[in-house]
Amino acid sequence: MKAPVSWIREYAALPDDLGIDELTHRLTMLGLKLEALEAPGDAITGPLVLGRVISRQPEPQKNGKTINWCSVDVGDANGTGDPQGIVCGAHNFDVGDLVVVALPGAVLPGGFAIGARKTYGHLSAGMICSAAELGLGQDHSGIIVLPDEAGVPGVDARAVLGLDDPVIEFEINPDRAYALSLRGIAREAALGFSVPFHDPAERELPSPDDSGYPVQVEDPVGCPVFVARTVTGLDPAAQTPEWMVRRLTQVGMRPISLAVDVTNYVMMELGQPIHGYDRDRLSGAIGVRRAREGEQLTTLDGVRRDLDPGDLLITDDSGPIGLAGVMGGEDTEISPSTTAVVIEAACFEATSIFRTQRRHRLPSEASKRFERGVDPALAGAAADRVAALLAELGGATIEPGCTQVGTPPPAASITIDADLPARISGIDIDLDTTVGHLEAIGCRVSLEGDRLTAVAPTWRPDLTDPFDLVEEVVRIVGYDRVPAVLPTAPAGRGLTRTQRLRRRVGHVLAGNGLTEVISYPFCSESDFESLGIEPADVRRQTLRLENPLSAEEPLLATTLLPGLLRALARNTGRANADVGLFEVSPVFIPTGSEAAPLLPTDRRPTEQEWQQLQKAVPHQPLHLAAAISGDREAAGWWGAGRPATWADAVEVVRSVATSLGVELTVTRATLAPWHPGRCAEFRIGELVVGHAGELHPRVVRSWGIPARTAVVEVDLDLLMRHAVDPVGPRFSAYPVAKEDVALEVAEDVPAAQVEQALRDGAGELLESIRLFDVYRGDQVAAGHKSLAFALRFRAADRTLTESESAAARDAAVRIAGERFGAAQR
Amino acid sequence: MSGPNTEYDPVAVTPLQADQVEAMRDQALAAIAAAEDLKALAQARSEHVGDRSPLALANREIGALPPQARKEVGQRVGQARGAVAQALAARTEVLEAEHEERTLLAETVDVTLPTRRHPAGSRHPITTLSDRIADIFVAMGWEIAEGPQVEAEWLNFDALNLGPDHPARTMQDTFWLEPADSALVLRTHTSPVQARTMLTREPPIYVACPGRVYRTDEVDATHSPVFHQVEGLVIDEGITMAHLKGTLDHLTTALFGEGITTRFRPSYFPFTEPSAEMDMVCFVCRGVDPEQCRTCRGEGWIELGGCGVVNPRVLVACGVDPDRYTGFAFGFGIDRILMFRHTVEDLRDVFEGDVRFTSAFGVEI
């Protein structure tokens, strides 16, 4: 909401010497936040004057554009008194119009210097300006055309345009609908500086009677108040006066015609949206009702809309003529030839307007105000103000009748403990202050014992709850007076176990040389396809967004790999070739019955409702994924580097599991997107935790990432659930007995199983076992391999004899032999 | 020295005569002194100290002497041998030191050579900053609460006094899940975690809720559809805005240093009443001559987020007795703090996964 300072001062008797910074700061601290300060005059230097168009010669150009070669009278402002020749690209003006001219030497906002320059075959000596070019809003659609009485050619245009009048743009919070008007903003300014406020809505009003334009409200809930006034004999040629044009421009509205401008002006002035109907295009009484199935309406923007039974309509005998409080219809629109206007000033229920506006995607200045709450007592004054302005400025006659259907609902009455503002704010606020501040915002306050009752003013429909009054009192007392007191929490128990484990995992992964990434969880069907994940795969059962940012990525990821591979490709694409990435994020698993209940809010949900809600929320297990490519160890003066392989991926999982104290079994598996021969599956007991290994070469190719890239994805929640706290180990100080064995087994026997067999056979004297070599070649049979293990034996209570350790070794080898036919070499 | 021994056997005792012993000693000392390296010293050792060395042989002769002569001769030989052993030890030490010095010199390397063979890993700065913020709350005795990212619409909106027709609902551009009636959203803030906490725990409640949230913002230098928030919630008896202010001042001081406190500006949030925007003193210029400050862009203050007293309507929906308890809540963006605390200029860097970005932050922030 934009407000020119001069307009604020019209209703608030602010001190003359009050600076703009002081004003905006005080209003910000009252809750009207300074969004921007426009002082467009500051950014313009040099000659900016009024000019009258003497001639205008349209000249089509080769590029398809038509330019106007104009001669403009700028008085003596150019030093010669001769007309100024100017090329102008806009077309919204005629000979005789009063326009704004920047003469050579002028500098416009953005450092745009105006000079005389050759263009389109003419010497264009200056520029005819649009509002946007002068920093007055965004309107680039045409040049500014001023009313005749705005001034004479050659006069400095700054004052005429209000360029010397700063305009404050406020960010208005949704609860302060009253501040979407100069009336409301000025009221706050007067409050902030404790100066008198003159309410522009206070006017002598005629009593409502039956002789006005007939109105029938069928839905008094949707439309509690409807006021109609009629003016006739409006001079269609009457121009909007310069002062009104200036103000409308300042608040960001484009002047259109007197009748429309007056309705907009009064809306800005009072906050009451107004609609004007061309009476001669109305047929029969105005009605207010909900739409019927199948009804349609063409709105002012020329769009034919299918109406919803929830839409509140303005009708006449012909059917719908407007979406109440949102946008009028085309058929009854005021036109340049309108002479008789029916003025509608009504109050519509906020929710209904909000829904209609949202349904038709039609946010308008009117709906913005109605959906936040318009002063229901304002309609009469606003309609009267419009009628008076049309009479004064457009020569219209105000018809004697005054229609009013409905009366404003009674204002809310709120009772609180009188010390509530002090108790909630922590500021020492006495009763006089509380009462005084509530009265200052327009409440009627009465006291009864320790209780205080405030009746809210009609313009504050937002005041409904006790704490609303607290905020009002405290913001006037000043939020800066809230003291700082650190509350004492009960002794806490620190992070939860899961939170600590998650940090541990992050440190382990970073310690392993991996870099954490956070990627978006959005993905597409084609992501799955390029991972080689078949349609029947459980990971293809995804949640889908109704309104994805990109239509290509409507799915919520069930695997972290798409995001991770995108990040990997981004890195390798930027020549960061040796990369190890990891991500710890949830994935989204549908439950198959996604329908969360919308519970009441006036009480705690029942246990059953709560369970139902919990059940509808999808399963979102935390996953850990990693992707490794390029060299894991760099080449250097020490020798060659070591490329990343499947084993690095497997080790990521193993090191995380070890850090959690989880024992994993590893088997080979076949699963997309991994290489069918190089994919490890990890289990806790029978529970599959995840997979790691080298990517399938097809996947590598379709993602454009380095060959042999290895990836990991595990269910980290599952791993952490099985985490075991470390137990202090016991170890022996007696000498170790070392035994090496080399076992020949078939190629397809997994080393881990041979190792397990050795463990099982070696018994409790075995301290550790380590596979230190895998040999294939002449020394072993074809289709076989030799696995060399180093076994360490040690007893807790004695030095082992050679025969004891040899016996343990032989027992180990025997079990391996029984299970896998392993022969010792 | 004792007097002459009349029972000397001249043949047997010749090597034990004083001048003989002295000569042996002097030869040995000379050989030791002359040894230039450990090898030569070993040679001298075997010639003059070894079993067959003259002094060793002389020593052996002592046993053959009559008892009355043994003492004097024994002393004489013993002293000589002692002097030689001492000289040998001293020389050994010198030569070993020289040898080691030469060896070390020969082992000199170029210590400026690069040494990193393994990549240094790093944690994402959003993770480490979240951890750091969590630690500040934990130090105050608070706990850290978490919740799902796909969330029930009721918890994300309704329970927080954002009814289906609340205008504020359009301020939050929400990702909705299919089907349309699923009533599920990607949470637009971490506030549903607060609602969950109130619904599952008894007051007093002191929790902070860091986490990932979603809004339908197109990606640019300051917007991302995915970002991170931390919210705080306190529900207890007698809680006031002063407790809110005290908590926020402590938080900003802990994160940005002494003197970095907050201020409130009136604002509006459906879930709090009274509501406030919170700003903190610019930690770069500290409000002194902010005109030149690039961090706060001349404001002297940095916008941090929103806060307020928990709206009693929220307490009711979440099963907390509004007559007994009051509370406060606040929330701010972790990504935003990362950006201004560590001069990250483009939010896209946070989510693109370029290792050069993340590596710069190491494993703690």
Image (tube, coloured by chain):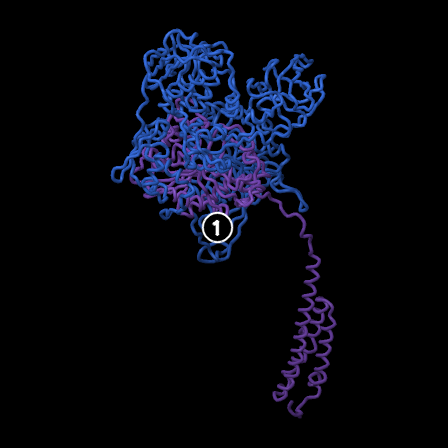
Chain colours: A blue, B purple
Quarter-of-image position of residue B103? bottom right
Q: Which residue is mark 1?
A: A767
Which three-letter amino acid code belongs to the residue tagged 1?
Glu
Observer-nearest residue: A335 or A608?
A335
**On screen, residue A642 above or below A616:** below
Q: Is residue A306 visible?
A: no
Residue at left 64%, top 91%?
A: B2
Observer-nearest residue: A81 or B153?
A81
**Residue B81 locus on image (x, y percent):** 66, 78
Observer-nearest residue: B18 or A126?
A126
**Residue A579 locus on image (x, y percent):** 59, 37
> Which residue is farthest left?
A449
Query: Quadrant of the image for the C terminus of chain A?
Result: top right
Q: Is residue A381 left or right of residue A824?
A: left
**Residue A78 locus on image (x, y percent):** 67, 23
Count the marks: how many?
Answer: 1
**On screen, residue A762 above or below A373:** below
Q: Local crowd at mark 1 within 10 Å, few (<14), some, or many (≥20)?
A: some
Quarter-of-image position of residue A389? top left
Residue at left 32%, top 22%?
A: A408
- Chain that bears disc 1: A
Observer-nearest residue: B246 or A675?
B246
